[in-house]
Structures are given as C-alpha cells and as structure tokens.
C-alpha cells in the first residue's frame, strides 16, 4: 500500500490534521456538524463535560460527553467546498495511520449528523419546523471530482430533475441518508429531498442587482415529483455530506431547522429559538440511541 505524501495529507506541528487541528484521539465516532462556528458552543453547552476545544480558521471543534455518549461537534462553514475539507479530514483521523501515513487495514464508520438551517419549498413545511433530508441533490460540482457510481434509480431521478427544471451545465448528483440514522429521527420531522445549491443568492433564486438565468427555478423545484419523492427544501451542504459520506463509508443524516418558506415569503421571527430546539432534540436522541 502506498504511503501518503506530506503534500497530500498535511499535518501541523502537533501531528493534527491541518484544517481541523484535531488528532485521532480528539474526535468521537459520533459527530455533529454545524455551519456557523459560533453554533459549536450552542451545542457543547449541553454537554456534561468537554475534554477538547480546538479552533483553526472557521473550523471549531469541541469533544465531550452527553451522559455516556461521547460526541464531537465541529463547524464546517458554508458550502460543499468546506464539506470536502471537513469530511476528508474526519475520515483521515479514523482511517489513516497518521504516523505511518498509510490507510488502516480495518476501517471505521463514523456517524455524522448535520444540524443546520434551511429554506422550505413547500407550503406544508412551515417556518420553525424540522426536516430530515431523505436525499441530498447537489447542484454544485463536488462529487464530480470523485469516482462515484450512482445506481439506476438515482440516474433516473437526476434525469427527470434536469428535464423538469431545464438546468444545463454541470449535471446534478444525488445521494441518500443513512437509514440506520434516519429511523431514529421520525417523530416531529418532515421528510423530503434537499437540494444543495452552490450559492445563496442567484443559485437560490434571489434577485438583488443581477438578473437570473433560471428565474422560474424556485417554482420548478417545488413542483418536482419522482414517484413518492418530492423536493422539500434547499441549503448549501447536504448533498456533499451524503455524497462524501457514502463514498467514505460513513453514516450521515442532515437535519434542518426551517427558517424561511420561499413559497409563502416568510422568515422565522426567532431563528435562535428554533435551532436551539433542534439541537436539544438531536442530542437527546443521540444520547438515548445505541448507534
């Protein structure tokens, strides 16, 4: 097996992965990801104890315990480009011997749960509700840099999506949530396909000073159906999480606090309260569940 070069896996002076500044013993096998670095402390304030606090750039990590459950919460920042960094480095921490720079013979599967915010594309998914993403459909290009093999249903869904929306350019990709995690997040959660966009303004149909190439995109997304599947919401990370998670062998789930409804034109009056409720609910389920 080939040794991984210094230029490919960068370690800092304390032997930690470069961006996350974490060593293998400092990461738990159950990980909560949040976008906002300031949200890490909003999760870890519910820990019974904190053993590790690290920060480098926008990547803040706290590892501790809720009851007997050891957890790491880490901020990813915004977008699938940052998901690429976080997921590859989390995987390296558990599946690469950092001293030998060799992939381990026995691989570890992490449980990774995103707790984030999102905008609804359906009237019946209201502001301040929660949603568990059955799939992440990526309008970004992250997964096209990796050897990914979609199954027949995924190919058919993507084809139907492109035909329906009229989007051209980089083909979308789609990956599903881990059923081993999804089954624990049922009561109190809507479900549906989450579209991951490569930006916040034009890619999500917002108009400030620039005209849009696809002005009807919001309506087309909300109208899309494929069998029992429909698109319920969009954000900027889920498809990358599901895609890389599947390729690397990790179990992933994206949980969304709905802070905007683009169909109704409404926005939450207290987003902090909504995300706090989702954090509490998520930690309670993780603590009580054998994963």
Image (cartoon, rainbow, N blue to C red):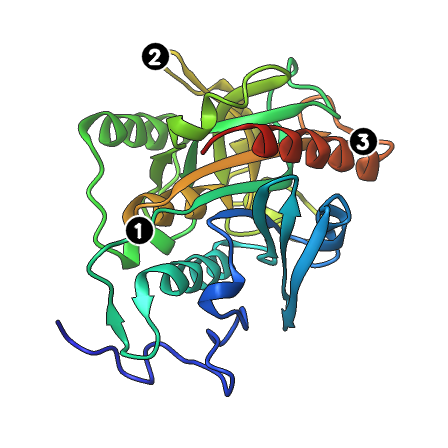
| Residue plotted at (27% across, 30% down) | 154
Nearer mark to the viewer, of 2 and 1 = 1
Residue closest to the eye, 50 or 283: 50
| Residue plotted at (75% across, 57% down) | 38
Instruction: Find out whether the residues at labels 2 and 1 contact each other: C-beta distance under 8 Å.
Output: no
What count of labels does the image hold?
3
| Outermost residue to the left | 1
Q: What residue would you read off at disc 3? A: 268
| Residue plotted at (36% across, 28% down) | 161
Q: What residue would you read off at disc 1? A: 248
What is the x, y in percent for residue 188?
64, 16
Q: Residues within 10 Å of mark 2 (few under 14, many from 20)?
A: few
What is the x, y in percent for residue 88?
39, 61
What is the x, y in percent for residue 108?
33, 51
Q: CA distance from mark 2 to mark 1?
A: 28 Å
Give the number of the disc on residue 28. Answer: none
Q: CA distance from mark 1 to mark 3?
A: 35 Å
Badge 3 or badge 2: first in the primary sequence: 2
**In this rendering, would 104 be left or right of 237?**
left
Q: Residues within 10 Å of mark 3 (few under 14, many from 20)?
A: some
Task: Locate the N terminus and report the quarter of the image it occupies.
Answer: bottom left
Q: CA distance from mark 3 to mark 2?
A: 31 Å
* SS label for mark 3: loop
Give the number of the disc on residue 227. Answer: 2
| Outermost residue to the right | 269
Q: Quadrant of residue 206?
A: top right
Badge 1 or badge 3: first in the primary sequence: 1
């Amino acid at each position: 097996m080939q040794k991984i070069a210094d230029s490919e896996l960068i370690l800092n002076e304390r032997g930690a992965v470069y961006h996350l500044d974490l060593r293998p013993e400092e990461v738990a096998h159950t990980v909560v990801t949040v976008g906002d670095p300031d949200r890490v402390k909003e999760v870890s304030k519910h820990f019974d104890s904190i053993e590790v606090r690290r920060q480098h750039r926008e990547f803040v990590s706290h590892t501790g315990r809720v009851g007997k459950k050891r957890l790491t919460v880490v901020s990813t920042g915004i977008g699938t480009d940052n998901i690429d960094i976080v997921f590859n480095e989390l995987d390296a921490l558990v599946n690469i011997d950092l001293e030998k720079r060799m992939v381990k013979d026995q691989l570890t599967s992490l449980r990774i749960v995103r707790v984030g915010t999102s905008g609804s594309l359906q009237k019946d998914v209201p502001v301040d509700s929660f949603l568990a993403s059955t799939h992440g459909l990526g309008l970004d290009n992250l997964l096209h840099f990796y050897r990914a093999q979609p199954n027949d249903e995924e190919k058919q869904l993507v084809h139907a999506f492109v035909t329906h929306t009229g989007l051209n350019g980089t083909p979308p990709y789609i990956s599903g949530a881990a059923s081993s995690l999804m089954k624990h997040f049922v009561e109190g959660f809507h479900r549906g396909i989450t579209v991951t966009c490569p930006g916040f303004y034009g890619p999500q149909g917002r108009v400030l000073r620039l005209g849009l190439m696809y002005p009807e995109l919001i309506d087309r997304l909300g109208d899309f159906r494929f069998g029992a599947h429909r698109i319920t919401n969009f954000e900027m990370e889920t498809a990358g999480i599901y895609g890389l998670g599947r390729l690397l062998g990790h179990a992933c789930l994206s949980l969304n606090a709905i802070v905007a409804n683009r169909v109704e034109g409404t926005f939450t009056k207290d987003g902090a309260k909504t995300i706090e409720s989702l954090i509490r609910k998520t930690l309670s389920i993780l603590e009580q569940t054998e994963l």
